[in-house]
Amino acid sequence: MDKKTQRCPYCQEAIYTNAIVCRYCRRDLPPNIPPAFRPKDPSWVPLLIGAAMVIGLGAILRAGYNPEAPQDVTNTDD
Ligand SMILES: [Zn+2]
């Protein structure tokens, strides 16, 4: 078990990081950001690769359709 401690934001006493209520002042503690929030699950990688392939393919097709297309980067519809 991970028994790291943190400071209670209310009374500054040392409490466990996984505590939900301070055992000193008995206040509700703000929830910690769970480690699961980090994208350690690589399920998004295939999506990213797929999106990159679609974008790359689209760019190739567009270049193939109109090889002399001006690089109009100032296409702003006011
Ligand atoms: Zn406290």
Image (spheres, rainbow, N blue to C red):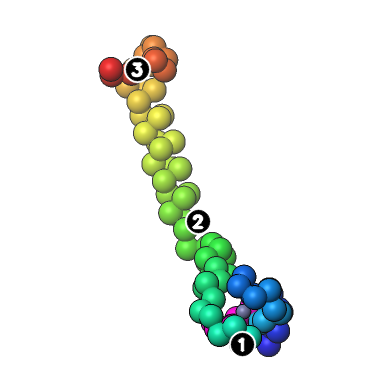
Given this view, does label 1 or label 3 mark the residue nearer the observer? 1
Q: Which residue is mark 2?
A: 45
Q: Quadrant of residue 78?
A: top left
Disc on the earlier residue, 1 or 3: 1
Q: Residue at image x 65%, y 75%?
A: 11
Marks 3 and 2, Cα distance to the nearest angstrom? 31 Å
Q: Residue at image x 53%, y 80%?
A: 27
Marks 1 and 3, Cα distance to the nearest angstrom? 60 Å
x and y percentages locating residue 66 in the rendered image:
34, 17
Q: Secondary structure at mark 1?
A: loop
Identify residue type, mark 3.
Answer: Asn
Disc 1 CB within 8 Å of nearest ligand 1 atom? yes
Q: Which of the pair 23/38 is nearer the observer?
A: 23
Q: Which residue is mark 3?
A: 75
Q: Is residue 74 above or below residue 59?
A: above
Q: In the image, is 71 to the left or to the right of 14?
A: left
Q: Which residues are magenta?
A: 17-23
Disc on the earlier residue, 1 or 2: 1
x and y percentages locating residue 18 in the rendered image:
60, 81
- For residue 31: magenta? no
